[in-house]
Amino acid sequence: MQNPTTSKESATINSVGIDLKLLRLPADYGATLGVKKLLTNVSVGKPKKPQFFRTHASDEMTFPAMILENKEVRESYVVVPEVAQEISELVRRAMLHAAIDRQNNVFLIPVPLPGEDGTRNPWHESLAQAVEHAKLQWIRITANMHVGGYDIYEAQGTLPDPEWPAHDIDALVEVAFRGKIITNLDHPVVQSLLGEI
Amino acid sequence: MSALNFSDGIFLVDFEFHPARGREGNPPIPVCIVVREWPSGRTWHYWQDDLQQMTVAPFPTGKKALFVAYYASAEMDSFHVLGWAPPANVLDLFTEFRCLTNGLRLAHGSGLLGALMHYGLPSIGSEQKDAMRDLILTGGPWSFAEQLAILDYCETDVAALANLLTAMEDQIDWPRALLRGRYMKAVSRVQINGVPLDVAALGKLQANWNAIQDQLIAEIDSDYGVYDGRTFKANRWEDYLVANDIPWPRLESGRLDMCAATFREMARTYIEVAPIRELRSALSEMRLANLHVGDDERNRCLLSPFRARTGRNQPSNSKFIFGPSVWLRGLIRPKPGWGLAYVDWSQQEFGIAAALSGDPAMMAAYRSGDPYLAFAIQAGAVPKTATKKTHEAEREQFKACVLAVQYGMGEASLAARINQPVARARQLLELHRRTYRKFWKWSDSAVDEAVLGGRLWAGFGWQIHTRDEINDRSLRNFPMQANGAEMLRIACILLTEAGIRVCAPVHDALLIEAPLDELDQAIATTKSLMQEASRIVLDGFELGSDVKEVRYPDRYMDKRGVVMWNKVMNLIGGPALT
């Protein structure tokens, strides 16, 4: 904000015959305070049934990872490759896609990657298609048990493109998996899943 | 002080005065004036006999001189009555003290004594001040000793001004302070002008008001059965609401919310509530005896500039014709051969929010001429070809949403307002946030600024300190209200200096008057200068205005008050409105 004039010198003008516009102070609240919204929460998972979302169109906003899901508490963990080799039956390879909903909440959608034979189950294939579709359109998805895949509903209105935060995928992954990166077999989640404790 | 470049001098001035013939509503009769040059301390005293002989002020008032007073509009009233040209430059230490301390808790208020105590300066006691005021208000004649006592008293105020100016000098935002002083000159012109009233109708109302109250209750309450004598019974009101299936807001205690604002809100949704709301308002706010009306049948009272936290005027509700229930505005009537025009900025708060936030969608919505419908279109809720006629219901909901955002209403209040489920209200508010993202970011920044920086400001320096009270709703609303007040002040300045006769400022509107053959031109000038005021405050963004004109023998009326006015006039045989 422009500081109000308190010096006597600047009061050489009188109150008549001046251009009033020159006295206007800008309404640039917060300009000098440097307040910015911090990215503190990034959830991981499929979008909820009523949630319209978009996925980032750039490949740079994807992140390949070995994911371990603890379905009991609906938590996902990233497992470092050395550990993943040891518990391959518990983890799966997935591509994390940056996504955003209409409330500007950023989240990551893990899409399981095809197996060594190049195939993946129909649900995963369907999810991958939805994620592709969401790069261009606002959509929501619901599970269709009869066909074994997701129905895609496209928003019909002319909705503005999402406003992505200025964070790269590494930053999103770091926030999403803060405290949820498994770097050794002693991790309590691994021990629990292996029935060691 | 030469650095201030007021080479003809700085003059601290105080008048003593009383209303003509002791009647509030009449212009003042100056009793004396004391002038002190600052900082030299040279002082002059003039009694009313001397003043009557003078055609100009007895000290320099041109562009190279500075006039200093506390509550300068009162001094300007005396200038006007004496036929003196107003000073070119006015510094009002009252407006500056208010501006410097607005939002802070002041132990002794913002009067002259309060300001002196705030800075730890000596002052006379309030009892002595009251006694001298009472003596002056007697209207004289005063003995020689009394005259000397009055002059001495007047000089104490000037001495206080000198101390105060010394204490405040380095804190004053000089160029904008002089602009506020310029507004105080405009306020005086408006106060002196006043609002023309139909005194005959007022007299009938005053004479019959006691009987009217009972008759009104009997007539209106026959549909409700909630009054016991003149007492509104809450339990009977609850019975009525249940019988008529009207969901009424309740307090945390579980009791019905009986505040006036709730009645006003509910009357908008449930039309059957409107008559009882008007009746309650009429009975509680009708204090006709306090309305200040001069001998010339004009309502005149202190406009109390800068009294509100937003910097708006805050005239007494009982003394100012725009204060009591709206139906009483039917008393406003131009004099024979004259006309009135009530000119208000169109959707002023929305326009200010759009311009200050720089939200392009919001600005486009304002410029469309119908921001409510434009919002619905922008949100994708109605087709681009929608009109007020084809999508009236949707437009009403989006209008309610815009107003809800301006008032800081939550989803529950908005739902009640539009008589829709909370989910619909939530959806509307969410659409507002999505459609006007830049506005919301700016609004969030205003709250951050208030909380972290400790103050908010408007375009021409009016500010509020925010450390003592953090209220998200009022902080978000402050920029719109305070800049609306700045806009009104600048419009008043431009209009009065252009010779337009302004009768009253009313929130975001101005009531002007002109001879009938000049009314059209006066309205055109008023609209043009109000547009200019908006451009000045909003960095070039222009707000439109709406006009309601009244030509003698018609009377002014707010459409909300027509039914009540006619009901009352029917009872006393007064003039009805069609």
Image: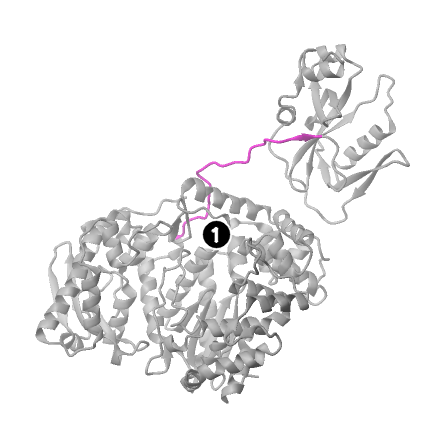
How does the figure colour the protein chain or chains? one colour
Where residue A82 sits: x, y (%)?
Answer: 71, 10
Residue B516 visible to the viewer? no
Is B162 magenta? The answer is: no
Residue B519 visible to the viewer? yes
Q: Nearer the viewer, residue A143 or B187?
A: A143
- Magenta-colored segment: predominant secondary structure: loop
- Farthest residue, direction right: A146
Residue that numbered label 1 is attached to: B474
The quadrant holding residue B62 is bottom left
Q: Nearer the viewer, residue B558 or A138?
A: B558
Magenta span of residues: A24-44
Q: Residue at x 65, y 50 (%)?
A: B426
Is A30 magenta? The answer is: yes
Mark 1 residue element = helix
Where residue A55 sits: x, y (%)?
Answer: 72, 34
